[in-house]
Image: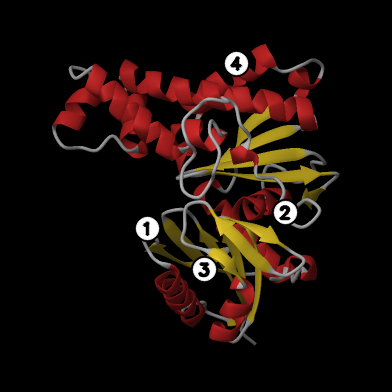
């Protein structure tokens, strides 16, 4: 009899990552699709086509799909209420996908799914209290309290990327109505904005020259130059890491976690990003929590959301079915 497979789907602000996953959380097939700029009907069509391709290439029987989507939820009604960086609003996403695909579909916030992956098989295995940030186009948050995911009273909690760290700061992006959110100041989008600013101010730097030559100072470019020793690129990562540390100190004071786990595409920078965050946390957080919390990279990296969504499908958690 063929092995059971489920499909895990991580939908970010710019792309979709899907994989066929077995009961040991091993991935057997992967695919990506761009999502930038799609209206809601085209978004649903793109997701449907990608997941169907994953099902067709799963190498085993697929009876469930788990989705992690960058959206606030109302678990009372199973509604995806609002996505910050995608055209998705007031949508019964799980029911729509289940009808289109003909299998059971389970849906939760994408960062919750990343946290679930780390809880089940990653760096948070056996940990009672932890929080996770996924840093990419935006910043998602997931909370693990008393050994379980915490979703809030109606499933809309743990939006850690939208904690304000600068009251008069820049407008947050997408559909967020706030200013000075962590997302607006320390996401991958913020990293790119700061890189452009610094490249304009220091055109003779390696970053400035790369920008002048037509290489957009996207996150991967900043990270590449920083790893090569460019002090200006390192300055940008230091700034973003310090801003993260401001947020980490407040999370530490509020939740007293054992771990702050950081994942997402920006984590290609590694300790060039995390060390400034650790230093700022140590300066700002209250003892004794500041002395015990550890800031660590996610085990599953950019695949954490996909793996967690697959775990959700394997477990068939009725509480988060949408």
Task: Choose the circle earlier in sequence order: 4 or 1.
Answer: 1
Nearer mark to the viewer, of 3 and 1? 1
Residue under pointer 4 = 279
Q: Is residue 24 visible?
A: no
Between the residue at mark 2 and the residue at mark 4, the CA separation in whole angstroms equals 29 Å
Relative to 149, say whether 93 is above or below.
below
Q: Which mark is residue 28?
A: 3
Residue under pointer 1 = 36
The answer to which quarter of the image holds residue 15 is bottom left
Relative to 131, say whether 92 is above or below.
below
Q: Which mark is residue 120?
A: 2
Q: From the viewer's perspective, tell me whether residue 144 is left or right of residue 271.
A: right
- Colouring method of the image: secondary structure
Between the residue at mark 3 and the residue at mark 2, the CA separation in whole angstroms equals 18 Å
Q: Is residue 173 visible?
A: yes
Mark 4 residue crowding within 10 angstroms, few (<14) / some (14–19) / many (20+) = some
The answer to which quarter of the image holds residue 65 is bottom right
User: Residue extending furthest right?
Assistant: 146
Instruction: Please tell me which residue lies in front, 121 or 130.
Output: 130
Instruction: Please tell me which residue lies in front, 11 or 125.
Output: 11
Q: Say which quadrant the N terminus sits in.
A: bottom right
Between the residue at mark 4 and the residue at mark 3, the CA separation in whole angstroms equals 39 Å
Task: Choose the circle earlier in sequence order: 2 or 4.
Answer: 2
């Amino acid at each position: 009899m063929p092995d059971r497979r489920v499909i895990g789907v991580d939908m970010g602000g710019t792309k979709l990552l899907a994989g066929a996953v077995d009961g040991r959380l091993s991935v057997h097939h992967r695919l990506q699709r761009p999502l930038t700029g799609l209206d809601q009907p085209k978004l649903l069509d793109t997701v449907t086509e990608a997941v169907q391709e994953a099902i067709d290439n799963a190498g085993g029987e697929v009876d469930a799909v788990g989705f992690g989507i960058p959206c606030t939820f109302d678990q009372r009604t199973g509604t995806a209420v609002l996505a910050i960086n995608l055209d998705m609003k007031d949508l019964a996403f799980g029911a729509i996908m289940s009808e289109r695909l003909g299998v059971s579909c389970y849906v939760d916030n994408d960062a919750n799914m990343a946290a679930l992956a780390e809880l089940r098989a990653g760096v948070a295995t056996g940990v009672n209290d932890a929080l996770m940030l996924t840093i990419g186009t935006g910043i998602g948050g997931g909370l693990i309290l008393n050994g379980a995911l915490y979703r809030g009273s109606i499933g809309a909690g743990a939006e850690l990327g939208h904690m304000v760290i600068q009251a008069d700061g820049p407008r947050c992006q997408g559909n967020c109505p706030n200013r000075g959110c962590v997302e607006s100041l320390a996401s991958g989008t913020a990293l790119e904005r700061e890189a452009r600013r610094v490249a304009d101010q220091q055109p003779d730097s390696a970053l400035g020259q790369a920008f002048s030559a037509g290489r957009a100072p996207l996150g991967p470019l900043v990270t590449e130059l920083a790893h090569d020793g460019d002090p200006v690129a390192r300055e940008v990562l230091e700034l973003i890491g310090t801003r993260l540390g401001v947020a980490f100190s407040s999370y530490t004071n509020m939740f007293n976690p054992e771990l702050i786990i950081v994942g997402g595409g920006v984590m290609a920078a590694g300790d060039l990003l995390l060390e400034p965050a650790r230093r700022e946390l140590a300066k700002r957080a209250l003892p004794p929590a500041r002395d015990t919390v550890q800031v660590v990279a996610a085990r599953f990296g950019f695949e954490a959301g996909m793996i967690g969504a697959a775990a959700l499908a394997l477990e068939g958690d009725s509480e988060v079915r949408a």
